[in-house]
Amino acid sequence: MKTEPAPFPAELLLDQPHRGQSLLRAFYQQHHERRNYKTAQHAEQKAAFFGRYVRDTLAPRNALGVDLGCRGGALTRRLGDMRWVGVDVDGVAVALANAAGVPCVEMDIGIGIHFKDASFDAVMMTEVLEHLAYPVITVREIHRILVKKPKSAFFGSVPLDYHLHRRWKVMRGKRLSGDPTHIHHFSFTELDHLLRFYFHRVEYLPLRGTAVRFPKLHLPYRFCVSDIAWIASYPRESVANWDIAEVL
């Protein structure tokens, strides 16, 4: 005799369909209370690096870019030679960006990015990927929303957590990163593999580390750089699934 499955007790469930997003926003707003929305880390170096590409390669009058995790538009405003919009999970950052003249909407980009295919000539995401659980999905989404032309570009930056200093910290029993919002820890090898999987060209700018202090030594990025920026351009027309096992 077949037994019917017992129904799940629905009275146990919360009627809050967006509870996860609300908790995430509250967490970041609490964390960001200690931050200055009007500045960006390594802002001068990034603005010069990205700005050169905007001026020399993109067509500023016609190009459209989106800053994912714009944090009040602190860096976006420095690249004003083209049209920019922004998104952020933090409502305070969204309000500040709009007040500063950068059209911005509140959006959780933790998994999906809610823009149509091939909407942008440039995507910027600085100091954000390390806060996301699945950056592989995010970079795939960035590739999807970029126009598939040689000039289209992904501007970004992340900390690198597997340089020699951090490895020595772990050997002494300390945490790899002291920031509680960092949930993905990049090595240069993983980052480079990921970007080149989706883009034909990748250019790097080391921002901090021994390789920055002693540039004439040409030290390897994988051991001697702790923060890095990039311009990944010329998105590939089609890509297969990225095999994370190749770089682990």
Image: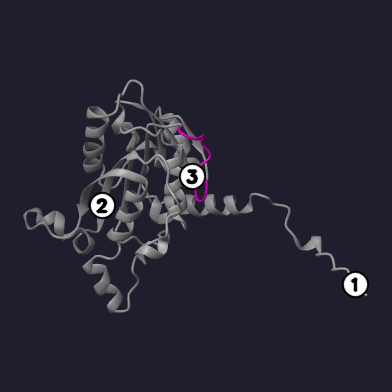
Q: Is residue 218 left or right of residue 29?
A: left
- The residue type indicated by label 3 comes to Asp
Report if residue 110 lies within the magenta region: yes
- The alpha-carbon separation of the residues under discs 3 and 2 comes to 24 Å
Badge 2 is on which residue? 228
Quadrant location of the C terminus in the rendered image: bottom left
Q: Residue furthest right?
A: 1
Along the polypeptide, which appears first: circle 3 or circle 1?
1
Query: Above or below — where is 62 with respect to 229?
Result: above
> Residue 81 falls in which quadrant of the image?
top left
- The alpha-carbon separation of the residues under discs 3 and 1 comes to 52 Å
- From which residue to which does the magenta span run? 109-118
Residue 239 spot, x, y in % from top left: 42, 47
Residue 25 spot, x, y in % from top left: 53, 49
Q: Is residue 134 left or right of residue 21?
A: left
Report if residue 152 lies within the magenta region: no
Circle 2 SS class: strand
> Measuring 36% from the left and 50% from the top, which residue is drawn there?
197
Q: Which mark is residue 2?
A: 1
Main SS, magenta residues = loop
